[in-house]
Image (tube, rainbow, N blue to C red):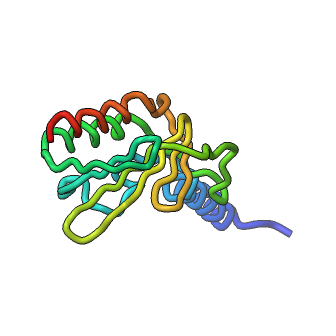
Amino acid sequence: MRININVLVIIIISIVQLGIYGHLHGEQRLRDFSETITVKKDAITEIKVSNLSGEYRSLTDEEQIDSVIVYFNQFNYKRLVNDQTSYMPTRTIMIYLRDDNNENFIIPYGKEVMINHKVYQVKGGELDEQFLLMIYELIDSND
Protein backbone atom coordinates (compact mmCIF):
# COMPACT_ATOMS: atom_id res chain seq x y z
CA MET A 1 0.00 0.00 0.00
CA ARG A 2 1.55 3.21 -1.15
CA ILE A 3 0.67 6.54 0.53
CA ASN A 4 0.43 9.50 -1.77
CA ILE A 5 3.25 11.92 -0.89
CA ASN A 6 0.96 14.94 -1.37
CA VAL A 7 -1.52 13.62 1.19
CA LEU A 8 1.29 12.97 3.65
CA VAL A 9 2.65 16.52 3.24
CA ILE A 10 -0.81 18.01 3.76
CA ILE A 11 -1.31 15.95 6.93
CA ILE A 12 2.09 16.99 8.35
CA ILE A 13 1.49 20.68 7.55
CA SER A 14 -1.96 20.49 9.16
CA ILE A 15 -0.57 18.95 12.34
CA VAL A 16 2.12 21.64 12.60
CA GLN A 17 -0.45 24.41 12.05
CA LEU A 18 -2.76 22.98 14.71
CA GLY A 19 0.15 22.78 17.14
CA ILE A 20 1.12 26.40 16.51
CA TYR A 21 -2.48 27.56 16.81
CA GLY A 22 -2.90 25.67 20.09
CA HIS A 23 0.27 27.20 21.49
CA LEU A 24 -0.68 30.76 20.52
CA HIS A 25 -4.29 30.58 21.66
CA GLY A 26 -4.21 28.07 24.53
CA GLU A 27 -5.26 28.87 28.06
CA GLN A 28 -1.77 28.26 29.48
CA ARG A 29 0.10 30.65 27.18
CA LEU A 30 1.87 33.75 28.47
CA ARG A 31 -0.37 36.81 28.51
CA ASP A 32 0.07 40.52 28.93
CA PHE A 33 -1.80 42.22 31.76
CA SER A 34 -4.38 43.65 29.36
CA GLU A 35 -5.28 40.10 28.26
CA THR A 36 -6.14 39.09 31.83
CA ILE A 37 -8.62 41.88 32.57
CA THR A 38 -11.97 42.73 31.00
CA VAL A 39 -11.93 46.44 31.81
CA LYS A 40 -10.44 48.68 29.16
CA LYS A 41 -6.97 49.52 30.40
CA ASP A 42 -7.08 53.02 28.93
CA ALA A 43 -10.56 53.74 30.31
CA ILE A 44 -9.98 52.90 33.99
CA THR A 45 -11.50 55.68 36.08
CA GLU A 46 -11.01 54.29 39.59
CA ILE A 47 -8.79 51.85 41.41
CA LYS A 48 -9.80 50.69 44.88
CA VAL A 49 -7.02 49.21 47.00
CA SER A 50 -7.31 47.47 50.35
CA ASN A 51 -4.71 47.09 53.05
CA LEU A 52 -4.13 43.85 54.94
CA SER A 53 -6.94 44.76 57.37
CA GLY A 54 -9.52 45.00 54.59
CA GLU A 55 -9.90 48.80 54.63
CA TYR A 56 -10.35 50.30 51.15
CA ARG A 57 -9.23 53.56 49.60
CA SER A 58 -10.05 54.84 46.14
CA LEU A 59 -7.65 56.24 43.59
CA THR A 60 -9.00 58.43 40.79
CA ASP A 61 -5.95 60.44 39.72
CA GLU A 62 -5.07 59.45 36.12
CA GLU A 63 -1.32 59.67 36.68
CA GLN A 64 -1.45 57.39 39.72
CA ILE A 65 -3.79 54.97 37.92
CA ASP A 66 -1.29 54.83 35.05
CA SER A 67 1.56 54.04 37.46
CA VAL A 68 -0.39 51.09 38.90
CA ILE A 69 -1.16 49.79 35.39
CA VAL A 70 2.51 50.21 34.38
CA TYR A 71 3.48 48.17 37.45
CA PHE A 72 1.23 45.25 36.47
CA ASN A 73 2.25 45.57 32.79
CA GLN A 74 5.88 44.76 33.57
CA PHE A 75 4.96 41.11 34.19
CA ASN A 76 3.57 38.31 32.05
CA TYR A 77 0.88 35.99 33.32
CA LYS A 78 0.47 32.27 32.71
CA ARG A 79 -2.88 30.73 33.59
CA LEU A 80 -2.64 27.79 35.96
CA VAL A 81 -4.27 24.53 34.92
CA ASN A 82 -7.78 24.36 36.41
CA ASP A 83 -6.90 27.53 38.35
CA GLN A 84 -5.26 25.37 41.01
CA THR A 85 -3.05 27.42 43.28
CA SER A 86 -0.48 25.93 45.59
CA TYR A 87 -0.85 28.74 48.11
CA MET A 88 -3.59 31.20 49.00
CA PRO A 89 -2.94 33.54 51.92
CA THR A 90 -5.65 34.22 54.46
CA ARG A 91 -5.01 37.98 54.38
CA THR A 92 -3.83 39.89 51.36
CA ILE A 93 -4.29 43.08 49.42
CA MET A 94 -7.23 43.32 47.06
CA ILE A 95 -7.46 45.68 44.10
CA TYR A 96 -10.53 46.66 42.08
CA LEU A 97 -10.21 48.24 38.63
CA ARG A 98 -13.24 50.11 37.30
CA ASP A 99 -14.06 51.62 33.96
CA ASP A 100 -17.43 53.08 33.00
CA ASN A 101 -19.08 49.68 32.53
CA ASN A 102 -17.07 46.95 34.27
CA GLU A 103 -15.19 46.09 37.43
CA ASN A 104 -12.34 43.59 37.78
CA PHE A 105 -10.62 42.41 40.91
CA ILE A 106 -7.03 41.41 41.51
CA ILE A 107 -5.73 39.44 44.48
CA PRO A 108 -1.92 39.45 44.28
CA TYR A 109 0.18 37.12 46.38
CA GLY A 110 3.81 36.82 45.41
CA LYS A 111 4.40 34.67 42.36
CA GLU A 112 0.70 34.11 41.76
CA VAL A 113 -2.31 36.37 41.29
CA MET A 114 -6.05 35.81 41.04
CA ILE A 115 -7.71 38.04 38.46
CA ASN A 116 -11.47 37.69 38.10
CA HIS A 117 -11.57 34.15 39.54
CA LYS A 118 -8.73 32.97 37.29
CA VAL A 119 -5.36 32.13 38.81
CA TYR A 120 -2.14 33.09 37.02
CA GLN A 121 1.52 32.47 37.69
CA VAL A 122 3.47 35.72 37.50
CA LYS A 123 6.39 35.53 35.08
CA GLY A 124 9.26 38.00 35.05
CA GLY A 125 9.28 38.78 38.75
CA GLU A 126 7.13 38.74 41.84
CA LEU A 127 4.31 41.06 42.83
CA ASP A 128 5.68 43.16 45.67
CA GLU A 129 3.27 43.48 48.57
CA GLN A 130 5.22 46.48 49.90
CA PHE A 131 4.76 48.37 46.63
CA LEU A 132 1.02 47.72 46.73
CA LEU A 133 0.82 48.82 50.38
CA MET A 134 2.76 51.96 49.40
CA ILE A 135 0.04 52.73 46.84
CA TYR A 136 -2.54 52.36 49.60
CA GLU A 137 -0.59 54.77 51.82
CA LEU A 138 -0.13 57.30 48.99
CA ILE A 139 -3.89 57.43 48.50
CA ASP A 140 -4.28 58.43 52.14
CA SER A 141 -1.70 61.19 51.90
CA ASN A 142 -3.52 62.75 48.92
CA ASP A 143 -6.91 63.01 50.68
Locate residue 123 relative to residue 32 in the image: left or right: right
138 over 18 or under it: above or below: above
Locate residue 16 relative to residue 39 in the image: left or right: right
The residue positioned 50% from the left and 58% from the top of the image is 25
64 over 2 or under it: above or below: above
Q: Quadrant of the C terminus?
A: top left
Frontmost residue, 74 versus 65: 65
Q: Quadrant of the N terminus?
A: bottom right
Total number of numbered labels? 0
The residue positioned 55% from the left and 58% from the top of the image is 27
Frontmost residue, 123 versus 62: 62
Which x, y percent locates residue 44?
Answer: 21, 56
The residue positioned 53% from the left and 58% from the top of the image is 118
Frontmost residue, 89 versus 57: 57
| Residue 73 in which image quadrant | top left
Q: Residue furthest right?
A: 1
Which x, y percent locates residue 33?
Answer: 37, 47
Which x, y percent locates residue 14?
Answer: 59, 63
The residue positioned 81% from the left and 66% from the top of the image is 2
50 over 67 or under it: above or below: below
Which x, y percent locates residue 99?
Answer: 22, 62
Locate residue 110 relative to residue 8 in the image: left or right: left
